[in-house]
Image (cartoon, grey):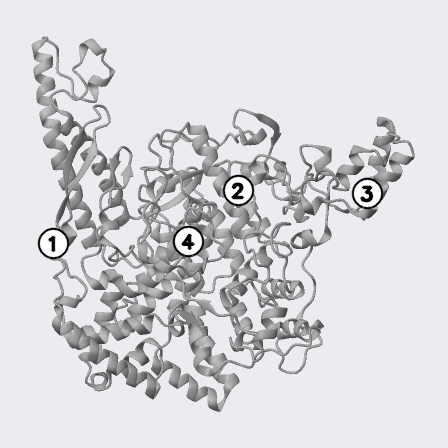
Amino acid sequence: PDDSVLMHSIRREYNDMPPKENDRLSEKEIGWVEQWIRDGAVWPSETVQDRFLREARTAVETDEGVLVQTSGGTSDQWTFRRYQPEDLWAFEPIAETRRQDLPIEANQSPIDFFIDAKIKQQAWQPAPEANPRELAIRSSMDLLGLRPSDDQIRQFESRYRDQPAVAWASWIDELLASPHYGERQAQHWLDVTRYADTGGMSNDYERSNMWRYRDYVVRAFNADKPYDAFVREQLAGDEMADRMVAQRLSERPDAVVETQMSGEYTVDEAEKIVATGYLRLGPWDNAMIDKEEARQIYLDDIVNNVGQTFLSTTMRCVKCHDHKFDPIPTRDYYRMYAAFATTHMAERRVPHLPAENLDGFEAGQAHVEKMLDFAIRERDKLVAIREQAAREWFESRDLEYRNNEARKSLPDDKKPPRNIGLNHVQEGRLKVREQDVWIWRRRLERYQPMAQSVFNAGASKLAWNGARKLRVDPKADRMTAPENFILTGGALDAQGDPVGPGVLSATRIPVDGNVGDAYRLPDDVTGRRTALAKWITHPEHPLTSRSYVNRIWQSHFGTGLAKNTNNFGGKGAKPTHPELLDFLARDFVENGWRIKRMHRMIMLSDAYRRSTRHPDPASIATEDPDNRLLTFFPRRRLTSEEIRDAMLVASGELNPSTGGLPAMPEINMEVALQPRMIQFSLAPAYQPSKTALQRNRRSLYAYRVRGMADPLLEIFNQPNPNESCELRDAAAVTPQVFTLLNSEFVGDRSIAIAAAISQSPQEKAEPIDALFRRILQREPSPRERERLERYRSDMVDYHRATPVPKSTYPTEITRSLVEEFSGKPFEYREILPRFEAYEPDLKAWQVDAEIRALADVAILLWNTNEWMYVP
């Protein structure tokens, strides 16, 4: 061994073997190799090796780790690999611990029992309780995403002084009962599920009725729908509706298909179909893609997001190979894939619900029809020129005239050139106008009783323009189940072993009612997703309840008990308080999967009510820099939506109406009018809603275009909707400062709040105090008041001497493109009718110097840490 290259290598004397530091052999392991060489480097025969392997595989746990029984990997090496027990924590059964099992003190929260125990182990002291004002703001931001008013805080403080516990519990109940609660919780959910109003990819066509799914989520949270029902409806609501239709119309054998075509559903049936909008949320487009590949992209996306959203399990890498770090074989991936193999996308006829907000339908539809009529007129002018030239071509050859569609099948010598009579400019404009007709006709569906959903079939023809239009296929094969295979390396043309629909075997949760393979789902064309949803919501499922209570915890403390809320696997962060996570998961299920109850339990704890300021910050920063033990409450910065909404609340401009059509806020004009490619053309320019009341709704309701983010929200880390976001990024970057100081949105809100104060007799007398009450919900100190009054006076002098340019809005613009066949540039006109008789927000040029100066003070307050961070 002293002369062995192997020994020199594993001792890292000449090179690093193994190359990764965390794979480095221990001194004990190196000693084994050295002794083996001294003993003659004996290598056993294959028979002896097999015997040793069989014996080793009988031991569930050894020094090398734990065996996990699954449906089997693509090789014995993977099937019998061993895992470190701590990496399998999420797959272990949830602990049976309940409240009555804990030695908790009188009036102590079970949450504090677990949190305080770890703090005491370190001999640390937790931070004191936050003051009532901080608690009021914190809790309101957490549950509603909105700051309470100064009056609300004062009333709460008064009640809190007399009966703290009663006042706090009552305050939380009031917040949970607010209709804005559902909006805030929906924002968290839509981050994970990737909500957008368009489909993304190269075309980014509108999914015109996606807003109905968004509103379903808001309603579900407000109604405190049990989480297990919430999951089942999103995964299989259409199957539930089909069963209800079959039962309701049992005398009609074809009732299910007939109702799918007619859309004559009851309210309950319609609600469940709308819920399956979840299955349409991912980015997808089948342009220029083989139909089988387009379908694979859709199914892969669904499997991956179902894993992340409901099971906190990453699935994407298992498409190509057995999971490198978790006990998930590629066989289980393709079983989950097969569970969705009979699922087909469709925009379905579904009546509008009594609970849905239909305000703005008439005006919105009128705008779309105006844009459509313009596109049709411009298209028809060009078509008329082309067809007149075509008629002359046919006549000159004594041939019968055929219209454009009919002559496509003619031989080349029997039909005129493709765009006869049109020059390159007209050819380019014709393509643009034809595309615009498609786009605006699609957008008309926004006002029709339709829903983004799915239907079941063994096979269904996929339209070539699927991103534009998908419908329930009446001729689809609803009887023959499709074949599914493991796709080696994820390649469609590399079929491996056949597989049927199934679930993750490592969970040890069997499928209800199955005989034989405990982890197989039914093979029938319909019902696969229902069975999958029941499996996911099994009361003993080790992943589902842990996943969601961890998300709830993150919504309050900024970080989950397990930090990676989308990944409970070996490479995700381990939970800081595993016993607490299991206690909450068990309590959640046994108390009806009630989400509001879980919020209430967390917020009544001492841990939640602690101050963000620890009395010994230096020691804590050294000993626990990430605050994993929660000795103090972690501060968090406002999210992008909270920033926008809070400004609108303070200025009095927020339209608090809930649900309905997407709002079209004003966004940076350069971005709104920028050219955005779509199917060899340009997408129509973004046009904001005509009135301030329509524009200034909560950010949750803002129109989300995958290919065009709102710069204001994007700069403050609104996540990209193409990928599931487990946790908002809170990075502070320089452009955020410039946005808060100089952006048009912040300037408009500042003018609005200053104008509102100047028009209020009570506030006008003390404008600085009024600004503090509206923005920071407190009175200014004497020094703050004196400094800001002086600043305001200086800015009045400045504004009196500085003119403000008048803002204008274009009613049409000129676009330029390159015609694809000739390669020559051309221009065309686009109308912007929303800016005709437009009602802009109040602008700086419309107010006097005193109001502009007070607006500058508002900008200062919106740039304070006190406003930007939740206390």
Q: Nearer the viewer, mark 3 or mark 4?
A: 3
Mark 4: which amino acid?
Pro
Going from N to C along the chain, the mark reached first, 2 or 1, is: 2
Local crowd size for mark 4, using a 10 Å CA cut-off: few (<14), some (14–19), many (≥20): many
Mark 1: which amino acid?
Glu
Front residue of 260/169: it is 169
Q: Nearer the viewer, mark 2 or mark 3?
A: 3
Residue 191 image-quadrant placement = bottom left
Going from N to C along the chain, the mark reached first, 4 or 2, is: 2
Going from N to C along the chain, the mark reached first, 3 or 1, is: 3
Q: Tell me, yes or no, if residue 755 can be seen here.
A: no
On-image quarter of the N terminus: top right
Q: Nearer the viewer, mark 3 or mark 1?
A: 3
Q: Element under label 3?
A: helix
Residue 214 image-quadrant placement = bottom left
Which numbered disc covers residue 836?
Answer: 1
Q: Is residue 735 left or right of residue 389?
A: right
Local crowd size for mark 2, using a 10 Å CA cut-off: few (<14), some (14–19), many (≥20): many
Mark 3: which amino acid?
Ile
| Residues under numbered marks 2 and 1 in contact, where contact means CB atoms less than 8 Å apart | no
Q: Element under label 4?
A: loop
Front residue of 378/510: it is 378
Which numbered disc covers residue 30?
Answer: 3
Q: Nearer the viewer, mark 4 or mark 2?
A: 4
Mark 2: which amino acid?
Gly
Q: Which residue is mark 2?
A: 527
Q: Which residue is mark 4?
A: 719
Going from N to C along the chain, the mark reached first, 1 or 4, is: 4
